[in-house]
Amino acid sequence: MDERNILDHQFVVAAYTVTWVIQLGYLAYLGLKWRSEKRNAERKSRPAR
Amino acid sequence: MKKVLLTLFPLVTVLLMVQGYHQAIYVAPDDAMQGYVFRIIYYHVPSASVAFLFFFISLIGSVGFLAFRRSSPNRAQIADAWALAGAEVGVVFCTVVLTTGPLWGRRAWGIWWTWDARLTTTLVLWLIYVSYLLLRRFAAGPQMQTLAAVLGIFGALDVPIVYMSNRWWRTQHPAPVFGGDQDSGMKDPTMVHALLWNMLAWFCWGMLVLFLRYQVERRHQQYAAIEAREALEASA
């Protein structure tokens, strides 16, 4: 592999990695939000003492 | 049935992702001009297409909210949840476009960024929807949803401008892959297949995330409605 190909490969890896970091990061944020909403709903449904 | 779909759809999406990756890296050939780095297109273009689609969903949701807000509050809330989900997931995909684009540009053109028509209008689109999300996050009061819906409609006006920008103004950005003139687009059918597989995969991924975001927002709306009712009862 010559230097040009190595650099090309690194840029493709960087682009694909950035894409997955953004997408999975957002999915994790949604998961946390979902859990927080679920907790709120459970707190509301619990009978008041 | 719903449970089967909820299990099957993520599984199909993952399989499509694997197939898309395989097509992009191992099946599609190098581009004659740009070589290996051209493979960034298989994530860049599908992300842009999905972002446009979700901004369109946000537009429909915003129009729906404004249409139903007086006559049918429940429908209006559903439309608003779709508007928010479309805008937020659209921003995520647009962020992918704005990060993979400069990486590709640095290698293909030797520069990270240029104030070319396509790049600039895409950045403006991203900024409009980020401001939409900031408005929803920090504004309070009954007018917030209405203001957000109006901003969402104005934001969507930029989508056709972004789409047409490299047809109207020929600058640094390459000609469109689909719907361009005879000289533009992909010539190799293997490349077209790889792009279509990735488009399908990212579309399914996007729909999955969009549905999840919609569900979270509906839960939030229901919780907020209960809280508002309790506050009213307490003050009465």
Image: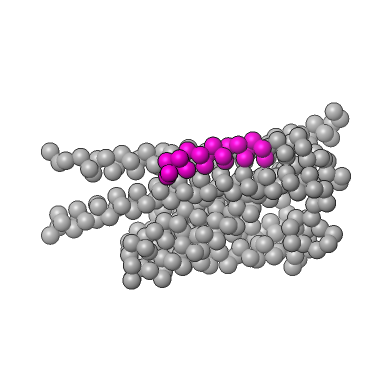
Residue B101 position within the rendered picture, expressed as x and y whole percent measured from the top left? 69, 48
- Identity of the residue drawn at 74% across and 36% down: B25
Viewer can see residue A39:
yes
Residue at the (69%, 56%) spot, across then down: B119
Task: Please determine whether, in this image, residue B126 is positioned above or below residue B112.
Answer: below
Residue sitting nearer the eye, B194 or B131: B194
Give the answer, above or below, for where A9 lies relative to B143.
above
Q: Which of B208 and B100 is in front in this view?
A: B208
Is B226 left or right of B211, judged from the image as shown? left
| Residue in view at x 40 percent, y 54 percent | B138
Quarter that holds the N terminus of chain B: top left
Q: Which residue shows up at 55% across the image and 61% down it?
A: B56
Viewer-side residue, B233 vs B27? B27
Work out whether residue B97 can be spotted: no
Point out the residue furthest to the front here: B1
Q: Is the magenta stretch mostly helix, strand or loop?
A: helix
| Residues in magenta, as a range | B1-20
Q: How many marks?
A: 0
Position of residue B199 measured from the top left corner of the image (x, y, whole percent): 65, 48
Q: In which quarter of the image is residue A45?
A: top left
The answer to whether A49 appears left or right of A8 in the picture is left
Q: How is the protein colored in the picture?
A: one colour
Q: Is residue B128 above or below residue A7?
A: below
- Magenta stretch encompasses residue A15: no
Quarter in which the C terminus of chain B is drawn: bottom left
Where does the image place residue B188, in percent across and percent down from the top left?
82, 48
- Comparing B61 with B169, the one in front is B61
Reply yes or no: does residue B8 show up in magenta.
yes
